[in-house]
Amino acid sequence: MENSRKAVTLTALAALLLTLAPMANASTLTVDLNPQTQVAKVNSLSATKIVFTYPANSAIAKYLENVSSSESLNASFTGGMGVRELQGSFDNRDTSVAVQNMTVALSYSAKGNATALVIDKTTNLTSYVTGVFKVVNGTVHADLGWRAYVVSGPMDLDMHDHAVDINMVGSMVQDSLATHVFALGFIMSAFGGSGVWNSPTLNFTALNTPLTSWIRSYDANTNTTTFTKTIAGESTFSATFSEDGQNYTMSEVSDPTGVVAVRGYANAQANSLVIVPAPAGSAGILVAASAIAVAAAAAAGYLYFRMRKPQSSGRAVLPT
């Protein structure tokens, strides 16, 4: 029976992870709260796709149809300008939180064909934040009003012995086309002043909705409460440029997902979580549900093999 319970628990956890997994090319903000250490682990996975389209017979198409470039960088920081910029984006919403350190993994790729250049950029920023928890009338509260942050300007970091802006779309385009001067000059002239060019990729403001509107779930086996929110097609940027009767476009679409997980039984109040003792019987309900799932699976298996078993045409023979 114990092995069956473990199997069901592992299956349930796997299903939960699949449910929370972000969609391809989506941005995900994950806040993992630990009341015991009073530290929040904030993982900001920013996935940005920029698409630049052009006529197949244009001069720019000849320069970009065979473009292919990529780069991957990573670094860790305990201070400096990058940490201060992240701290500043939190300060705009809540001055009590403090960034202790952060690690950054940046990767991008650019591929061109006869009609479009597609640039994919992924920034995985993990930071550890304190000052989130407080005790009110003997109850632990976690203030998350700062979570839907945005780094509004360039975020320059020293990565592999040179400064890299990991935030702005324009910087990503420039880095991707650094060796294609003609194409880069054209794009900067056409879109350098547009909203796409100056838009930040570390932007999770779309998730600034009350936690009471997020989907809540509680896992008694791990004693974890999870809140999730997905907003598709948010922050769509698009710009068009015309020259000699030909149209060129640049666009970006963001699909942010938010996941807030806290150890313990928690309820949402606006943008805060209140951590309280789990109601009596919550674990029992989960065990009962697991037992029902096991029984249902066993019954289904029995019926399946019963239907597949050949039917005898004569007298029933009892086993010896």
Image (spheres, rainbow, N blue to C red):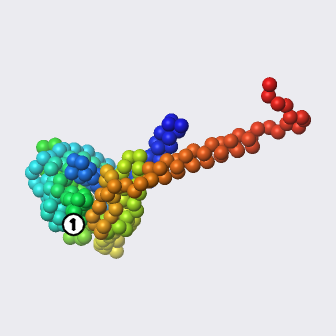
Residue 221 at x, y percent in the picture: 41, 46
Asked whether residue 179 is in view, the answer is no
Residue drawn 74% across and 41% down?
Answer: 306
Kind of residue indicated by mark 1: Asn
Q: Residue furthest left?
A: 80
On screen, residue 115 above or below 310: below
> Where in the figure is residue 296, as x and y percent of width and height?
61, 48
Residue sitting at 21 percent across and 66 percent down? Answer: 198
The answer to which quarter of the image holds residue 271 is: bottom left
Q: In which quarter of the view is residue 305 placed?
A: top right
> Which of the 4 image quarters holds residue 233?
bottom left
Q: Is residue 158 left or right of residue 46?
A: left
Q: Secondary structure at mark 1?
A: loop
Return the residue found at the far top.
320
Question: How many marks overall?
Answer: 1
Q: Quadrant of the C terminus?
A: top right
**Closer to the camera in the image, 68 or 16:** 16
Residue drawn 65% across and 42% down?
Answer: 301
Which one is in front, 168 or 291?
A: 291
Question: Residue 115: x percent and y percent?
Answer: 38, 61
Depth check, front residue: 260 or 189? 260
Q: Is residue 178 left or right of residue 120?
A: left
Q: Residue 167: horizontal and vertical position, in percent?
A: 21, 58
Q: What residue is disc 1 on?
A: 198
Q: Residue furthest right?
A: 314
Q: Is residue 269 left or right of residue 319?
A: left
Q: Residue at x 27, y 52 (%)?
A: 33
Callout 1 crowding tier (Cα within 10 Å): few <14, some 14–19, many ≥20:
some
Q: Is residue 34 visible?
A: yes
